């Protein structure tokens, strides 16, 4: 909507200011309003393109940043459990990773862990972890050993919505030459109480 700052005209800013007359935000300058509107729509645009992400707001430094990964760290209830494994040296089945995942796993050296996590999360959602048709519907990143970022598409996302899964927890173990991942699909407690 506001791909360029010039689209945020003074007439719009005055109209918005009239809506908030008497509220704390009315004290901000028009330039601050313009910055907030432009930055907000930039974040919205990036979220739409990526279909998910994390927006971080640093109020003291007046900065807003976007990341493609999502790791909400929600404390909730278990709505699914799954286990996945990958042999070392890492040899995931052909077609398990998309181009971006393949590049990312090689750069980070987390090929086996990512393959095992992908299988475990699919199983936690009640989906056949060995079905190649499901592999393209889930993208997994491991920002740190204890966190996982999951992007779902199509039928896999629909199943997560049915289960009301909003986050995932993973744990890794080595068993012989295999990396084994246990995944928990987490639902918000408030959804269970409804």
Image (spheres, rainbow, N blue to C red):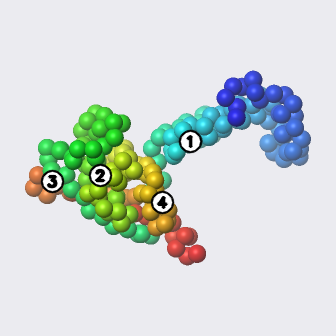
Cα–Cα gap, marks 2 and 3: 21 Å
Cα–Cα gap, marks 2 and 4: 17 Å
Cα–Cα gap, marks 2 and 1: 27 Å
Residue at the outermost bottom position:
193
Q: Determine whether, in the image, residue 63 is placed left or right of residue 91.
A: right
- The crowding category of the residue bearing disc 3, from other C-alpha atoms within 10 Å (few below 14, some 14 to 19, many at least 20), is some
Assign a secondary structure to mark 4.
helix
Q: Residue 66 location in percent, x, y?
A: 53, 38
Q: Nearer the viewer, residue 148 or 125?
A: 125
Labels 2 and 3 touching (C-beta < 8 A): no
Labels 1 and 3 touching (C-beta < 8 A): no
Mark 2 vs mark 4: give the one in front.
2
Q: Which labelled disc corresponds to residue 178?
A: 3
Q: Which labelled disc corresponds to residue 132?
A: 2
Mark 1 vs mark 4: give the one in front.
4
Q: Is residue 61 above or below residue 130?
A: above
Assign a secondary structure to mark 1.
helix
Cα–Cα gap, marks 1 and 4: 19 Å
Q: Earlier in the sequence, mark 2 or mark 3?
A: 2
Quadrant of residue 11 within the rendered picture: top right
Labels 2 and 4 touching (C-beta < 8 A): no
Q: Earlier in the sequence, mark 2 or mark 4?
A: 2
Assign a secondary structure to mark 2.
helix
Q: Residue 135 location in percent, x, y?
A: 33, 50
- The crowding category of the residue bearing disc 1, from other C-alpha atoms within 10 Å (few below 14, some 14 to 19, many at least 20), is some
Q: Which residue is mark 1?
A: 47
Q: Which residue is mark 4?
A: 158
């Amino acid at each position: 909507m506001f791909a360029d700052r010039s689209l945020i005209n003074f007439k719009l800013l005055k109209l918005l200011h009239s809506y908030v007359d008497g509220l704390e935000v009315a004290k901000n300058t028009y330039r601050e309003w313009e910055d907030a509107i432009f930055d907000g729509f930039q974040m919205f645009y990036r979220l739409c393109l990526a279909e998910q992400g994390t927006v971080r707001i640093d109020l003291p430094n007046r900065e807003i940043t976007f990341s493609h990964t999502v790791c909400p760290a929600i404390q909730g209830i278990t709505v699914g459990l799954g286990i996945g494994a990958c042999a070392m040296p890492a040899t995931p089945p052909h077609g398990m990773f998309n181009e971006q995942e393949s590049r990312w796993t090689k750069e980070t050296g987390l090929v086996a862990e990512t393959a095992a996590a992908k299988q475990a999360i699919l199983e936690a959602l009640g989906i056949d972890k060995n079905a190649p048709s499901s592999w393209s519907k889930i993208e997994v990143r491991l920002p740190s050993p204890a966190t996982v970022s999951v992007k779902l598409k199509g039928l896999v996302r629909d199943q997560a919505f049915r289960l009301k899964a909003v986050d995932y927890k993973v744990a890794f173990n080595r068993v012989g030459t295999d990396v084994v991942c246990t995944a928990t699909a987490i639902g918000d407690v408030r959804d269970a109480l409804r």
